[in-house]
Image: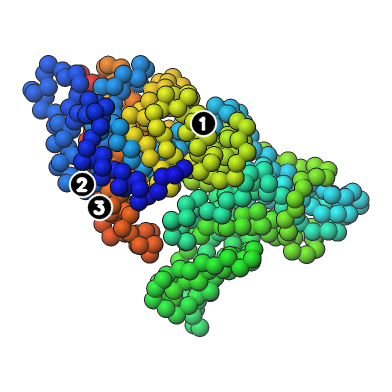
């Protein structure tokens, strides 16, 4: 992509010192069209709202007619900032365009030999189709289907095929090792590629567990292993040991007991190991360790189809699942003819599509989830996509309903949060006037850039900064509602 975090921060500093002519013409903290009774209504000015929070960093926004795309009110609309998870709204549009709302991901079990008298004379292959919402319950339903076919024994072993998508070890290399929202991505995913780590104190120290649980099933796994170490910091360490995820945790941080999700770096083998555990629980024996295979060949025994893409994207936008965004973005790129290997390459394909489809001037996304903060997008470009998608288009029904603290207003939006980065983008509707499309980006990149890796999970001041940014966003929605959508 050619855009580094340091270069991006430097570029912003230059933009602040010498704003371009185009931005000067388009930038204003005041509406371009002002109602005659503005003074009597005592609606706070945008600059006053922002100044009242004393938020460090930069704020930019754009407000447009959601139907025509005409800009109504802007502040630094061309200033590119990290969109954070608001980028997932763009990924949803990209996936819908290239895959369609009814697209389903398929996960298959294949037999490399005949099934005779309950014995499979060969291997059982678990062939992934990229399904981002495959979970342990789905694997259990596949095992029950195999049992219903008469399978009781596997002469060979369990193999996994993961080549439907490139194998990507983590979404963003700048995240702390232990955060569950930064897992590996591949053609075979399970439980959002997270493993459950639990611990409890006992007389001799701590009992720990690593499992691939669902709500009703708790299969233990051995590919991910945890060791409790008597130390202060760091709290967690991670090391790849072949196909084993080796973790250590500081005893001083554990307390009496608890649990958390950790990211998985070998998701295909994780899914295969959980499948093998479920087979054994159903009385279906298999030999040897779970291994990869380069070919998804054999007789199809059972196929599990995911929910329709529209429902998957709705869940992605509601819960902001990074894995779902990356899988759907990669799959959309492949469907469009892309043959790359990295998230940045696939995001580049999406950037080009956004420019061609919606007229975005300079989208610079480095992934499909918004997790990487070297991604950059201007408020004006985000609003172009929102209005270009259409008020009656496919995106708005998938977005989460956002509470503007005024029952007369309706907001469908996507939030985005990173350390010292906050975004909000979507649609605003009220009892009068035309519906509006908006985006509000806040970021303090020098402060974010100064964080050490140990500080990135819970930085000092991060929660307070984020709350302040969200107050600005909420106040701007209330301002726009009062100006353009509510009775005078």
Q: Earlier in the sequence, mark 2 or mark 3?
A: 2
- Mark 1 crowdedness (10 Å alpha carbons): few <14, some 14-19, many ≥20: many
Residue closest to the eye, 80 or 305 = 80
Q: Secondary structure at mark 1?
A: helix
> Which residue in the structure is indicated by mark 2?
55
Residue closest to the eye, 28 or 53 = 28
Scheme of colours in the image: rainbow
Residue at x-position 28% and y-position 31%: 77
Q: Residue furthest left?
A: 40
Q: Position of residue 136 (x, y in %)?
A: 63, 52
Q: Position of residue 275 (x, y in %)?
A: 70, 55
Q: Secondary structure at mark 2?
A: loop
Residue at x-position 88% and y-position 50%: 113
Q: Earlier in the sequence, mark 3 or mark 1?
A: 1
Residue at x-position 33% and y-position 54%: 449
Q: Alpha-carbon distance for marks 2 and 3?
A: 10 Å
Q: Position of residue 389 (x, y in %)?
A: 44, 23
Q: Alpha-carbon distance for marks 2 and 1?
A: 33 Å
Q: Position of residue 72 (x, y in %)?
A: 26, 22
Which of labels 3 and 1 is toward the front? 1
> Which residue in the structure is indicated by mark 3?
464
Mark 2 and 3 residues: CB-CB less than 8 Å, in contact? Answer: no
> Which residue in the structure is indicated by mark 1?
94
Q: Secondary structure at mark 3?
A: helix
Q: Alpha-carbon distance for marks 3 and 1?
A: 34 Å
Mark 2 and 1 residues: CB-CB less than 8 Å, in contact? Answer: no
Which of labels 2 and 3 is toward the front? 2
């Amino acid at each position: 992509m050619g855009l580094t975090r340091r270069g991006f921060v430097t570029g912003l500093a230059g933009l602040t010192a010498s704003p371009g002519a185009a931005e000067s013409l388009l930038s204003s903290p005041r509406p371009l069209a002002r109602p005659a009774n503005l003074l009597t209504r005592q609606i706070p000015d945008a600059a006053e709202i922002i100044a009242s929070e004393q938020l460090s960093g930069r704020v930019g926004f754009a407000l447009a007619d959601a139907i025509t795309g005409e800009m109504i009110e802007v502040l630094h609309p061309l200033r590119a900032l990290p969109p954070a998870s608001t980028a997932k709204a763009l990924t949803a549009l990209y996936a819908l365009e290239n895959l369609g709302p009814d697209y389903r991901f398929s996960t298959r079990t294949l037999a490399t030999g005949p099934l005779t008298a309950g014995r499979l004379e060969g291997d059982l292959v678990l062939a992934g189709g990229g399904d981002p919402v495959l979970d342990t319950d789905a694997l259990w339903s596949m095992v029950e289907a195999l049992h219903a076919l008469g399978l009781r024994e596997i002469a060979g072993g369990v193999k996994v095929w993961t080549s439907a998508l490139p194998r990507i070890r983590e979404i963003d290399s700048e995240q702390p090792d232990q955060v569950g929202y930064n897992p590996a991505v591949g053609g075979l995913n399970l439980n959002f590629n997270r493993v459950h780590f639990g611990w409890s104190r006992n007389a001799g120290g701590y009992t720990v567990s690593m499992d691939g649980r669902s709500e009703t099933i708790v299969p233990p796994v051995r590919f991910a292993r945890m060791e409790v170490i008597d130390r202060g910091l760091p709290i967690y360490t991670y090391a790849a040991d072949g196909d084993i995820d080796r973790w250590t945790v500081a005893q001083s941080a554990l307390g009496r007991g608890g649990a958390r999700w950790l990211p998985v770096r070998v998701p295909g083998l994780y899914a295969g190991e959980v499948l093998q555990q479920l087979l054994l629980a159903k009385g279906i024996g298999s030999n040897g360790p779970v291994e990869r295979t380069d070919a998804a060949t054999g007789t199809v025994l059972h196929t599990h189809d995911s929910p329709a893409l529209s429902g998957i994207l709705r869940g992605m936008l509601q819960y902001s699942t990074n894995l779902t965004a990356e899988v759907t973005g990669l799959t959309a790129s492949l469907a469009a003819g892309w043959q790359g290997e990295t998230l940045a390459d696939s995001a580049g394909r999406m950037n080009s599509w956004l420019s061609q489809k919606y007229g975005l001037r300079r989208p610079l996304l480095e992934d499909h989830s918004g997790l990487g903060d070297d991604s950059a997008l201007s408020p004006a470009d985000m609003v172009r996509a929102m209005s270009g998608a259409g008020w009656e288009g496919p995106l708005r029904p998938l977005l989460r309903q956002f509470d503007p603290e005024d029952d007369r207003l309706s907001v469908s939006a996507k939030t985005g949060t990173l350390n010292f980065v906050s975004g909000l983008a979507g649609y605003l509707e009220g009892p009068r006037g035309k519906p509006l499309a908006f985006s509000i980006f806040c970021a303090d990149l020098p402060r974010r850039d100064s964080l050490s890796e140990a500080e990135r999970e819970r930085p000092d001041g991060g929660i307070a900064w984020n709350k302040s940014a969200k107050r600005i966003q909420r106040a701007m929605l209330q301002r726009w509602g009062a100006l353009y959508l509510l009775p005078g």
